[in-house]
Amino acid sequence: MPALIRPATAADIPLILEFIRGLADYEKLSHEVVATEETLRTTLFPSDAAPNPRPAAECILAFTDTGAPAGFALYFFNYSTFLAKTGLYLEDLFVKPEFRGDGIGKALLLHLAKLANQIGCGRMEWSVLDWNQPAIAFYESIGAERKTDWTICRLAGPALARYS
């Protein structure tokens, strides 16, 4: 289990980017990472003078008892019209390979589940790649339900520009 889970600050941006790149490597999606320290700063820790001064997402970091950075979770709040309640969407969860199996991922998820309950969220959701059987097994072990009747749709890059 981690010795410390805490909210990320702007000073943690290099570490957040390191975790994002580590996750992308694991998911075989490194070629899709265009995030930079500057884009993370403007979206996660915007200034009050920014066009949108609200953070796009929030991030928590996990550290070992020796202070080594071990993992992170990046999340944001959405809304369920059916429940008429806020939901917590987990965008990214990553634990460094050398700390997997030590309870870091479970502790990060538990931290977010407690937060979701504390603020009255109706649910907590996330996506997982079909081939990531270790993650799927882990999520099912904590009681998560797989939503196999849903398909993720996405407009991005040129397709988003064309449609808009």
Image: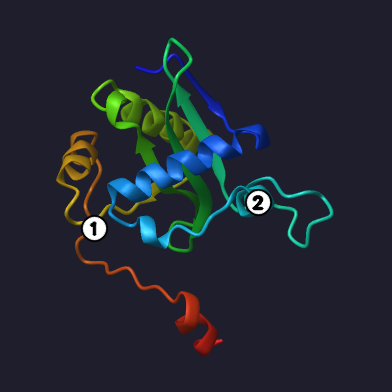
Foreground residue among 20 and 91: 20
Name the residue located 28 percent from the left edge and 31 percent from the top edge: 97
Foreground residue among 23 and 111: 23
Q: Nearer the viewer, mark 1 or mark 2?
A: 2
Name the residue located 25 percent from the left edge and 55 percent from the top edge: 129
Q: Mark 1 falls on what kind of element?
A: loop
- In the displayed orientation, state which residue is furthest to the top: 66
Image coordinates of residue 38 in percent, x first then y, are 65, 51
Name the residue located 38 percent from the left edge and 42 percent from the top edge: 22
When asked about the image quadrant of residue 72, the answer is top left
| Direction from residue 158 to residue 11 in the image, left or right | right
Q: Mark 2 falls on what kind of element?
A: helix
Crowd tier of the residue under label 2, counting other residues whose Cα lies within 10 Å: few below 14, some 14–19, many 20 or above: few
| Direction from residue 94 to residue 59 in the image, left or right | right
Q: What is the three-letter code of the residue carrying label 1?
A: Lys
Determine which residue is flagged by label 1: 147
Image coordinates of residue 23 in percent, x first then y, are 36, 45
Please state, as top left, top right, bottom left or bottom right, where the N terminus lies in the image. Answer: top left
When asked about the image quadrant of residue 6, the answer is top right
Name the residue located 48 percent from the left edge and 15 percent from the top edge: 67
Q: Colour mode?
A: rainbow
Determine which residue is flagged by label 2: 38
Q: CA–CA distance between discs 1 and 2?
A: 35 Å
The reply to whether residue 133 is visible in this rendering is yes
Please state, as top left, top right, bottom left or bottom right, where the C terminus lies in the image. Answer: bottom right
| Direction from residue 72 to residue 54 in the image, left or right | right
Image coordinates of residue 52 in percent, x first then y, are 73, 59
| Direction from residue 36 to residue 47 in the image, left or right | right
Of the residues under marks 1 and 2, which one precedes in the sequence?
2
Image coordinates of residue 128 in percent, x first then y, are 28, 52
Q: What is the three-letter code of the residue carrying label 2?
A: Glu
